[in-house]
Amino acid sequence: MRPPAAIVLLALSESVLLALPLLPAIDELLRKRDAKPLEVIQKHAGDITYFARGFRNYLGPLLESLRQCTETRSNSWGRLKNGEECVLLGDDRQSFMRAANLHGPVCEWLVAAGINVAFPNGLNFAKEVYAAKSLLSGKRNVFRAVFGDEDVHLGEGSETMRWAHAGGQFRADSGCSLYGRVSSDREILLAPDCRFQRLHAPRIVLGHLSKNRSANSAETQRDRPLARRLIDGDFHIHAGEVISDNLVARGTLHIGPGARMVGSVKGHGSVVLEERVVVSGSLISSGELRIGRACRIGGPILAERRIEISSQTVCGMPDMPTTVSSPIVHATEGSLFHGTLWARETGRVVAQQ
Amino acid sequence: MELRSRTTRAERQSTGFRAQLSEMIDCLFLIVAVICIYTVRHYFFTLNRLFGFQRHPYVDIDTANWPNVTVLVAAHNEEKVITHILTALTEVNYPAEKLLIVPVNDRSTDGTKRIIDRFASEHPGRIHAFHRTGGKGGKAAALRDAMELVETEVILIFDADYIPGAGLIKQLVAPFFDPEVGGVMGRVVPLNVGRNLLTRLLDLERAGGYQVDQQARMNLRLVPQHGGTVAGVRRSALHEIGGWNDSSLTEDTDLTFRLLLAGWKTVYQNRSECYEEVPETWSVRIRQIMRWAKGHNQALVTYARRLLFGRHRAMWRERVDGFLLLGVYAMAPVTLLGWILALGVFYERQSLFDGVLAILCLTAYSAVGNFAAFFEIAAAARLDSTPTRIRILPLLVLGFLVSIVAVSRAALSQAFAPITGAKFHWDKTERFRVSS
């Protein structure tokens, strides 16, 4: 081979070798298989009832048939657009097991009830359940998801796997496990030993509320900005003391009984509130947060590790709901929340000693 | 006699050359050491993002007594895009009575004023137009002037080419419930990804920068950077640090460090995503990155010493990370210098060791060092569940080379500005969207 030809050949083979690793890139550049903008959630905005409302709309085509069943006091079967089967309950004289043609503990079809419905113990619903009237579950029922236009009452030891929504009151007896989202347009009542993740309602009651609750309210933080007090290290606020600034402690923070914080409070370490402390603004801990008995918190409550809430404590107000959030939330029965109570990993209603 | 004199001169020259070479090698060592620090930083951030604990402390706040908010939309000749952002802002789920939208028309000569006025008349009380016809150029100067309309404690800032989603305002406001937070930054997501090679490369760069770099700094409680758009600032914090700095080319970097020095936190919200338009031509991209580099280096000169050694409220880890963050744009000319030195040492070697050392240095930081940034971007693509776009990654070398030259040019022109008399000026980023 002549030297010029050898050089050209060498250059060509080198170019091919160099270009080889770039082939997938060039292929993707030309074919644009993954060239769409990253999907950004533009619309639903994280609304807790997003899936529940979506399910209600999905059921829409069957609602007319359900109304007819209810009027004629009969049970029937329907089919949704995607071919999914649904049992329509309109006859309250017939048992659910018979109406749904069940011979075992697992109900594999979607259930829509136009009447007050009560389920037997130990049933497992593999598909969603809809109730136009009140729904009373048996003990140890397992629901994939539940939507009730009115009240929903889960029996002892029941579980919801994805979400539950009640237009009226949502009540869970002791030992229930509520995975995913639970919301109510009116009220959520959880008995002791219930486990939860994300709850949202104008009023969330854990256990029984004490009749002699103290009346001191967490007067909400005004819109005018407060001065900031930044403390390097640990900080202690004495009993009954009133702090009128926003407070940030870069260590642990201990707030004595009956102290009143007009602004917001944050601690880089653990934050401990003794009983009857009032915080008008937000309460934030980069570690653990322990809220004593009969405290009142007006703004959002966040802890990056864990929150413990004692009885008679009230978070948020009826006209100014708020968010309580942490990976782990342990709230003692007798505490009251207005807004969202969110345990990223696990939340538990602790029975009062 | 003459021979001895010549020999002595040659020996002296040789000794001088050796000393010069030794200095070059020392300098090369220093450069490699600095690059190693940045390499470790890149890997550390990426590994943290892949395997570490992820902090999103404010993302759960969905119910609250939401504060009054002013949204400033900086607009200089933005007729192509301003309609989209104003429409999007009127559709957000923030309580309408608590949200004031202020489009800041900064001396526009196109149809921006007309569009803004139309929106203001269609949404009285919700949109309050601010027209600026004179004064100093630049976004910071415009925002400084627009502050006369701001009465709320929380201020959000958007550039006009952004399109916020329905829940974005609440997400950006939520961190301000934390009394320590002075600034908030959301994630920027390119909208015009598929236009050409450049937009695809910028999409990858943005993913690496936000999905990995910013979030890792948030995870590690370091210094997430305020980006000046899809962002917020607390008015009392801004007031405390002296307001917008209109002499800065990158008011966002400037703000980040002034907040930090005053003990305010800037937090990053990775899930507060917002679409933006990235440059579609290389010339626009080069101008953009040169402005960023100059602004960043300006901040480096202004704050680096004070940040590291001064008496202020930043913690030690924030001092170190802040210093490294300040130096990111200075790394381009440093790397370039490293390449030149390594080649110089290789060809002027006095011993075999020098040459090998030079080649090792060159290879080490060209391969492993720079690969760290690629690794970061690949990790971001994985976290975003967009595995196919990783294939473009090797072509990022092109973007990297363009950036390194542009940033070095910016640094040089900045360094020689006192001699050449060149003045800093604001380069507006051209828009490519078809106006509606």
Image (cartoon, coloured by chain):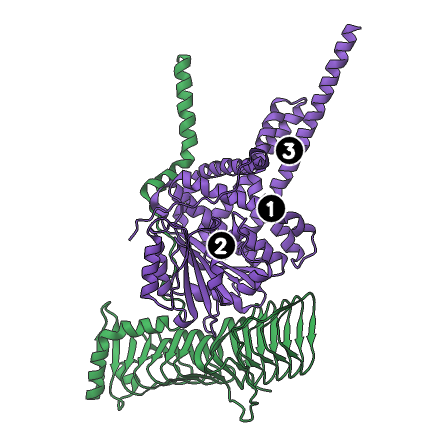
Whether marks 1 and 3 lie on the same chain: yes
Q: Is residue B378 left or right of residue A215?
A: left
Say which residue label 3 marks: B28
| Residue found at the far right of this picture | B1
Q: Quadrant of the N terminus of chain A?
A: top left
Residue drawn at the location 41% of the way across and 63% of the way down: B101
Dot 1 falls on a residue whose secondary structure is helix
Q: Which residue is the extreme one toward the bottom?
A: A211
Q: Quadrant of the C terminus of chain A?
A: bottom right
Question: How packed is label 1: few (under 14 Cα within 10 Å), some, or many (20 or more)?
Answer: many
The residue that label 2 is drawn on is B228
Q: Color used for chain A?
A: green
Circles 1, 3 touching at the beta carbon (< 8 Å)? no
Residue at the extreme front of the image, as rendered? B134
Q: Amino acid at mark 2?
A: Gly
Res. A256 image quadrant? bottom right
Residue B142 in view here:
yes
Q: Residues within 10 Å of mark 3 (few under 14, many from 20)?
A: many
Q: Colour of chain B?
A: purple
Please state which of residues A83 and B237 is positioned toward the viewer in this rendering: B237
Image x and y of residue A92, in percent: 27, 89
Residue designated by label 1:
B300
What percent of the width, then of the height, locates residue A21? 42, 36
- How many angstroms separate mark 1 from mark 3 (CA)? 22 Å
Hey, what amino acid is under mark 1?
Leu
Horizontally, residue A255 falls left or right of residue A157, namely right
Number of labels in the image equals: 3
In the image, taking residue A142 as reference, residue B140 lies left or right, namely right
Provide residue B119's location: percent of width, then percent of height. Answer: 33, 61
Residue at image coords 33%, 73%: A53
**Residue type at numbered disc 3:** Leu
